[in-house]
Amino acid sequence: MRTEGSPEQSLRRVLKAAGYRMRKSRAPISSDNLGGYMIVDMSGNAVAAGGRFELTLEEVREWVRDMC
């Protein structure tokens, strides 16, 4: 029996299928790193959203809904 997994994993799968990757901040919080998530375009390894790791999971979900 397959389970759905966490909301984070579900978003990662959807983003990967669309050519994006979601990164979670691992560094200490600072002015350049707000401790959230970033979306990266895998084709050019460029930041698509959340350049300062400022996205929440809900904001990532909204971005996916709007862009993918």
Image: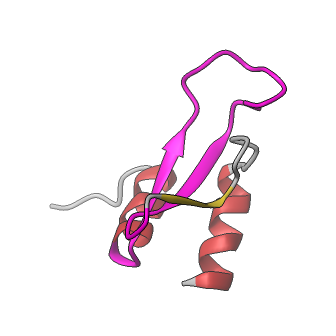
Q: Residue at x 49, y 53 (%)?
A: 22
Q: Is residue 26 depicted above or below 4 in this figure?
A: above
Q: Residue at x 36, y 67 (%)?
A: 16
Q: Position of residue 3 (x, y in %)?
A: 28, 58
Residue at far left of view: 1
Does the magenta segment cover residue 63? no
Does the magenta segment cover residue 27? yes
Residue at far front of view: 44
Q: Place residue 17 in its image quadrant.
A: bottom left
Question: Is residue 30 shown left or right of residue 19?
Answer: right
Residue at far right of view: 31
Q: Quadrant of the N terminus?
A: bottom left
- Residue closest to the eye, 56 or 53: 53
Q: Residue at x 58, y 32 (%)?
A: 25
Q: Quadrant of the C terminus?
A: bottom right
Looking at the rendering, the stretch of residues picked out in magenta corresponds to 17-44
Question: Is residue 16 shown left or right of residue 15?
Answer: left
